[in-house]
Image (cartoon, rainbow, N blue to C red):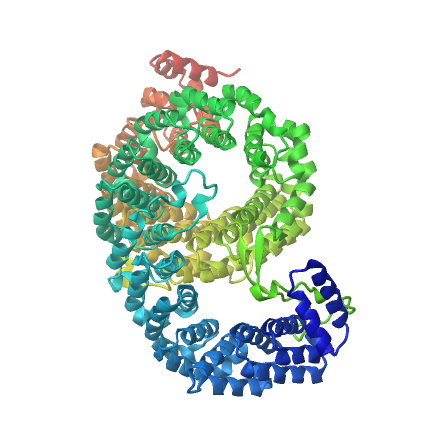
Amino acid sequence: MTEDLERILSQLTQADSAAIQQATAQLKMAFRDPAVIPALCAVMTGSQDPQIRQSAAVMLRMRVKKHWKKISPDHRESLKAVVLQAFQQETEHVVRHSLSQLSAVLVKHETPDRWPALLNLLNQSTKSSNPQDRQVGLLLLSKVVDSNPEAFKPHYRQLLRLFDTVLQDLSSPTALYYCILTLTAITAHTGQGELNMMRSLVPRLSVAIRHLVKADQDQASEAMEVFDEMMESDISVMVPHVSDIVRFWLEIAADASLSDSLRMKALSCTAFLIRLKSKVILKQKLLSPILQTVFPVLSAAPPPGQEDPEDQEDAENGEDAENPKHLAAQVIDTLAMHLPPEKLFQQLTPFMQACLSSKNPYEQKAGLMCLAVLAEGCADHMRTRMLPAVLQTVCQSLSDSNQLVRSAGLFALGQFSEHLQPDVSKYCAELMPLLMGYLSGLNQAKTGHVTKAFYALENFLENLGGEIQPYLPSLMETMLGALNNSENLKIKELAVSAIGAIANAAKEMLVPYFPPVIESLKASLTDIREEVRCLQTQALGLYLSASSASLCLSNPVSSVLGSRVLTYSLFSAVSTVSPESLTPHLSTITSVMLLSLKSTEGVTAHQDEEAQFVLLDDDDDDDSGDVVLDEEGEKEGNESDITGFSVENAYIDEKEDACDALGELALNTGTAFLPFLEVTFQQVFEMRDFPHEDVRRAAFASMGQFCCAQHKVWQGNPTEDNHQALQKLLSTVLPSFLEAVRQEHERQVVMAVLESMNGVLKSCQGEALRPAGRLGEISQVIRSVLKKKTVCQDGGGDEADDEQQAEFDAMLQEFAGEGIPLLASAVPADTFYPFLNELLPLIMNKAKSSCTVAERSFAQGTLAEIMQSLAAVSGGRPVAGRLSNRLLPVMMAGVRDSDPEVRNNSVFGLGSLAKAAGPIITENYPTLLSLFSSLLSKESDRRVIDNVCGALCRMITSNTPCVPLEQVFPALLSHLPLKVDLEENRTVFDCMAFLYSHNPSLVVSHIKAVLSASSHVIGTKDLDADGQDTLLLFLRKLAQHHSCEFQCAVMSLPSERKAALVALVTPV
């Protein structure tokens, strides 16, 4: 049989396809004979042709992977002995490599302790005085350890001593490479006992990889994975040596003679370290060397005759092609996300300004790209301190003669429009004419540049609201022109997308433009070409917006509902507008979405190169129907020669959109969704562990919406079954939220979890806190975030560092803080008080004058909302009174703050405290009234003034005898109507009605001012429905009981407001 097998394997290497087919059939027959194992072993050790020896080793590896349980014990032992014998006598590297892989597969089944000959060979070869033997031994070691690292745990200390020796011998780069691969494999599995030994290896690693760079850059790039593993497993191993390690990475990144992949790996490691240990970057004074490295990379010109990928007009996916420049920008982006902006800008600004003032277009582009990537992580800093200057810089770049600079300016403007709201929209008068003029002068043949112009325009339009009105005719003329006159599908897609942004801002103002838009899109909706699918998706979105949802779903356009042309976000939109029209389609819609969540479409498996030439699929042998389980109960044969995966962005996006849409559908369609809730929830719940953070974020958000949906169903139909279903959901979702907050590495995912948990608390209130201990668990998690003790917060920080932090860290704490008033409103005050007592100091700490404006505003706003919650729950008054001595000084200091938002929140807080505590703080009323009087005399911010009015009203209704109404009421009336914070209208007019019922003469004596203020809000959207009812009843009583005074006061009103008020007040 051995000779036959060698002949068959030889035929498989020929170029004759007929011979290959014949050999494949013969090989399948041979595999039916159990003697094939010893025969292949004989070929593997005895053939004179290295390619055939390699083929035999690969065949054996496939057989062991798929059918280990079917191999007899004798053949197993024989195979173990033969593979080691073959390995020792083999002289060809490719065959050794295959033999080491075969050994690695055997180690998955036969642990090292059950294969002492392997351990002996490894021990002898890796310690041999012969460099070639050591290198071969290290090759075998790297493969077997990588295949089953846990099994080698008892030997880790011995391995680490070996690595220490190997890393000091720089004469053999290949041995260094295999040594580092083995270290990479065990890093995630090491325990506390090995940490000190690991720590001592770190300096040797950078020296070894530096030598490896000179020998083989691809191997050096792969070896640098060891740093990622160390950082992810236990970064404390690297911290003592972090300065030297980072400087080594920067040295590689700065060397333009090295390969892009190696430089990108070095920059990627740098960014990863910043994410995990940003404080170390500052303490070790590494920020300056990082910036000194990344700016030259970011501003480097490409080789002569070439362009950067994002600047290539003919490169369809140029934007996605990563290069060192993209990684350099990513490093700056990561710095912005994780460092305090004051400390970052202090050192970054000189580099950025030098680029922006340069005449070199690539350096100008680098400066603008830097501004663009800073916008998300340092939004507050840029909004409050830099916006006019940076906007001027960006606007000037749009008139530059070089398209590179203009493109970068457009990208920066798009980023500003997305992240620096609402402030950037205030520059509408300057920016809109600039953008419109720029768009009208574009060469549509340069699609890449046109795309950037639309990106900037669309992001800016999205947030304009009513300010878009003056520009609407010219905007729509431009968009309709692009739809009707351009043959370029990409231009049409951009125009449709921009119309969507215009619609978001213009609302009903866009209605007159919909007929021509839909007319222009009709042809696209029926086009069956694959390349039109993206345009169809966007067109359908507009179609649904323009038409009745039920009409859309019942006409021929609904034929696309079964395809993925219609994106899931459209289903979300329809469920918001017309949920009942989706009910007949929920079964189909949820089925398609579940398929998307389960799908592996878009994931490409990369095969082991050695296995690719093997055409045999030995699953077709005579035992293919058997199912054999290994010790863990897994199906044997489920492994393959896969070395890795690549994942398309669209695959990630589809799963994210499906999660988002299922949550929206559940929430908006209510009872109709119940038959699908359990199965869809289960699939979304599994997505919480998905590798990509965007999918995890969407899954957690959707899980919260499922809870809110079930709560709404139970409220509408309070049966025991619905209640149990709600509690079952909550008992699954909330613990998973708490675990994610503690252990999730990505801050944006944790923010989404906290936001989703807050939504559940707001909707379900006490139902979410029924189980004993849950209130304490949620309070403890909030406390951990506020104290920076979660995994995504760099593991906590020194108290001395608390004064300055990255804006995203502050945002994370804000999401956590928002949960405190929600907890306070969900349970009796006495129940929550012990937890509130622990949380309050952490909030009050952020009200210090040394904190940022955002932190002070957050602290005052949170304290105010806590007081507002206490005012509405059982036992709230005594608890608010107990806290008043601690809170009053903090809130009163906030009223004197230099920032209007902080003053506003502080005023709101004092009013809420007065309402919650009532007569308990009587002695503080004179001080508060004096403070408000002083503030009104000099305050220019209308929102603050509106909130002072609201606070005075709360003081009046809570403790009327302690307010000198003869002075306070006229002062209040003199600042009406409210101009900005219109929600306070409810408080103001409730107070007026209250005063009239308790002191009618006071109100009548100021009836002209009362009616003037009332005439501004009655019958308008400035006062909610319940408030309108209260106001109308109050005015009718005034008119009925004080008709003479009422008529005189009405006559003093402007004619339009007079007619409206009389019409509403006069009974029909």
Q: Position of residue 683 (x, y in %)?
A: 62, 53
- The image quadrant of residue 359 is top left
- Judge left or right: residue 533 versus residue 460: right
- The image quadrant of residue 335 is bottom left
Question: From the viewer's perspective, is residue 709 above or below residue 221?
Answer: above
Q: Position of residue 682 (x, y in %)?
A: 63, 54
Q: Please give the name of the residue rendered at 54% of the width and 73% of the height, measured from the top-left corner.
A: 97
Viewer-nearest residue: 625 or 196: 625
Viewer-nearest residue: 210 or 534: 210
Residue 608 in view (yes/no): no
- Judge left or right: residue 437 versus residue 761: left
Q: Position of residue 5 (x, y in %)?
A: 71, 74
Q: Position of residue 114 (x, y in %)?
A: 60, 85
Q: Quadrant of the N terminus?
A: bottom right
Residue 249 in view (yes/no): yes
Count of numbered badges drawn on the protein: 0
Viewer-nearest residue: 1018 or 679: 679
Q: Please give the name of the residue rendered at 48% of the width and 41% of the height, measured from the top-left corner.
A: 316
- Judge left or right: residue 133 versus residue 799: right
Question: From the viewer's perspective, is residue 833 above or below residue 623?
Answer: above
- The image quadrant of residue 212 is bottom left
